[in-house]
Amino acid sequence: MTPILKSDCTIIDSDKAVEPMVTVDMLLVNALRHLDDEGRKMLVERLSSYGNSAPKVEPLDIDKALKLPTLTDITEYAISCHRNTNHKYDGTKPYGHHLSMVEKVANEFQHLLGMTDTFNVIAACYCHDLIEDTRETYNDVLKRTNKEIADIAYALTNEKGRNRKERANDKYYQGIRDCGKNAVFVKVCDRIANIQYSLENKSGMFHKYVKENNNFMGQLYRDDLKPMFDKLIELTKTPMP
């Protein structure tokens, strides 16, 4: 019987599979990208041990996957870009503090994502402000990550404007919607993280987020991300400590 590679990198017999089928090459590439060098070697060796009964994956796909940046590579790249431009969060904190908060929100809601979306979304959580706040261009981000991550970073880059309303105008939100569900997911993670921080630190930004929330939700709401928008409503109704 032909083995199937699951998203958690375990091998199961095909006649015992109870999960929706996803192509093996997609799962293998996704799994390899999450692993460090040692983990990648172990997985490839394990697949090789199946001989002729191994999942049918073209060798070129494995070679490409082994050359892809890991999640650690991408997060370190993003954090270093903010650090190298002396970009701070709330004026004093390393920007990585905010990026890790965005990732934490993404992890809370990752069950809303597709099986193979998690890697790009978590990476995009770290890269979403690179074009807007560091000296990186779209092509810079593309070279260090992949097209979807670069597209999300581009979509989440504010328009030119003299104030918050002009920078986050209708064209800006249209670009996020056009980029797709994962871009909306990352933007909402960013907003939730910002609101949580403003509440915890009694920041005046909290009142701005409350004022903007109806428009923000109206621009980006999706039924398939409803729990995230419910969280936004809950946060904006929280009394300032």
Image (cartoon, rainbow, N blue to C red):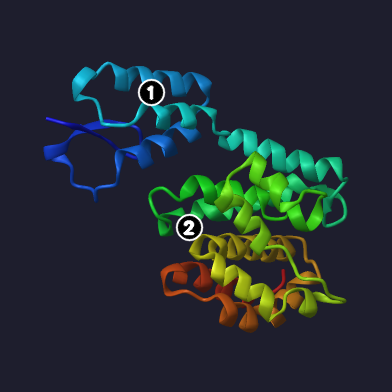
Pointer 1 local density, CA inside 10 Å: few below 14, some 14–19, many at least 20: some
Task: Report x, y in % for residue 166.
Answer: 79, 79
- Residue sitting at 16 percent across and 31 percent down? 2
Q: Which mark is residue 134?
A: none
Q: Quadrant of the N terminus?
A: top left
Residue 67 rendering spot, x and y as whole percentages: 54, 28
Q: Taking 217 as reference, is 154 left or right? A: right
- On the question of residue 238 being in view, the answer is no
Q: Is residue 116 above or below residue 65?
A: below
Task: Kindly identify which residue carries mark 1.
Answer: 43
For disc 2, the marked residue is 109
Q: Nearer the viewer, residue 205 or 223?
A: 223
- Report the front residue among 115 and 140: 140
Q: Is residue 45 above or below residue 120?
A: above
Closer to the chain start, of discs 1 and 2, is 1
What residue is shown at x 24% (from left), y 48% (from top)? 21
Q: Residue at x 66, y 39 (%)?
A: 144
**Which quadrant: the C terminus?**
bottom right
Coordinates of residue 176 in the picture (x, y in percent): 60, 68
Q: Residue 96 vs residue 28: left or right?
A: right
Residue shown at the point (57%, 50%) measured from the top left: 147
Mark 2 residue type = Phe
SS class, disc 1? helix
Q: Secondary structure at mark 2?
A: loop
Marks 1 and 2, Cα distance to the nearest angstrom? 28 Å
State the count of labels: 2
